[in-house]
Image (cartoon, grey):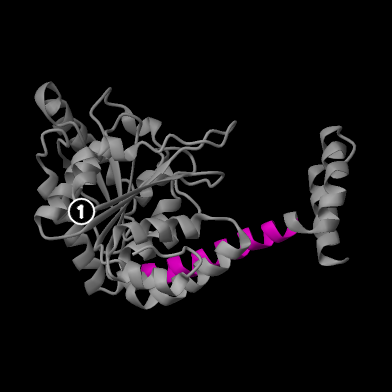
Amino acid sequence: MTVSPLDPSALARSVRAGERRAVARAITLIESTRPDHRASAEILLHELLPYTGGAVRIGITGVPGAGKSTFIESFGLHVLAQGGRPAVLAVDPSSPRTGGSILGDKTRMEDLSRDPRAFIRPSPSGCTLGGVARRTREAMLVCEAAGFDVIVVETVGVGQSETAVADMVDMFLLLLVPGGGDELQGIKKGIVELADAIIVNKADGDLAIAAARAARDYGNALHLLAPAASGWQVPVLTCSALTRTGIDSVWKTVCDHRDRLGANGALTARREEQARAWMWSEVSETLLQSLRDDARIAALLPEMEQSVAGGRVSPGAAARRLVGLFKGE
């Protein structure tokens, strides 16, 4: 059945029926910046919201070359074997020059993408920091309403602002590889502190011994940091996404983490806090967009930008003048 993207009620019904094409159309709708699409997206999400919240939400980041896509495919196939339905929301970096993205994650998860019980959606990061796209949260809700019970968010990759995903998932996994033995020095401390589990990938062949040694080193280093979740000791696991060994231990850890947080009420508290943070993030984005769309601001902005660039006005003074004009002061 073909559903117009501007018929949010019909689209919501198709999403609830588990139609993968409808899920894709729904995410395209919520990612659109057109005002009429934004209005339709809000109606869509309102109708889907009662059917969300039941999935396990997992965020995955890692150093370059850690094999995130290969790991996620092996993990997703394992979830399928356990009777689950995984959805992967992969965020690709956008070019700062052209704004374009390759969006090639489906080609790197060939086996998983062919299974009709799974869903993979690559999205560009755009101007959003933190390794995720601005509408990743809404995309998660769409997937949950469609019946996917394990949602995996793959971030762009480790970086200074690569922690935003931790504010939208139940469990944050940090994927590393055995290497020079000094990897923790090159990883931002904030990411390590937010991780609910550290996984050393590529523990196969000649790297198996190095992976075990790296896992011990990471485990020792973690004793110096407070755990991300109350009552949870951050584990360090080894696996090989290529040979698909150790993936069962990762899945067991995910289940144990959810059970632990669910038993002590921490999962509910975490999601409530995430919802509040999401609201304020939307407030900030909406106010900024409203300011940019204001005709008075648009008329004054070129002059202010030239004055700031020429050193005649400080950025702070220019910002206060623009905001004051927006507020009618």
Question: Is residue 165 placed above or below 170 in the rendered structure?
Answer: above
Residue 273 in the magenta stretch? The answer is: yes
The residue positioned 31% from the left and 66% from the top of the image is 144
Quadrant where the image shows the N terminus: bottom left
* Residue 236 visible, this angle: no
Residue 308 in the magenta stretch? The answer is: no
Q: Quadrant of residue 11?
A: bottom left
Residue that mark 1 sits on: 116
Q: Which residues are magenta?
A: 270-291
Instruction: Tell me residue 14's x, y (percent).
Output: 34, 68
Instruction: Tell me residue 9's x, y (percent).
Output: 43, 74
Residue 122 vs residue 151, the one in the foreground = 122
The residue positioned 78% from the left and 59% from the top of the image is 294
The crowd level at tag 1 (other Cα within 10 Å; few <14, some 14-19, many 20+) is: few
Question: Is residue 284 placed above or below 44 in the rendered structure?
Answer: above
Instruction: Tell me residue 137's x, y (percent).
Output: 43, 60
Residue 214 vs residue 147, the one in the foreground = 147
* Residue 26 visible, this angle: yes
Q: Seen in the image, is 326 located left or right of residue 170? A: right
Question: Is residue 242 placed above or below 2 in the rendered structure?
Answer: above
Q: Quadrant of residue 287?
A: bottom right
Circle 1 — which element?
Answer: loop
Instruction: Tell me residue 279's x, y (percent).
Output: 53, 68
Q: Seen in the image, is 317 located left or right of residue 60? A: right
Q: In the rendered structure, which amino acid carries the disc numbered 1?
A: Pro
The residue positioned 74% from the left and 57% from the top of the image is 293
Question: So how many labels did they put on this image?
Answer: 1
Quadrant where the image shows the C terminus: bottom right
The residue positioned 68% from the left and 57% from the top of the image is 289
Identify the main secondary structure in magenta: helix
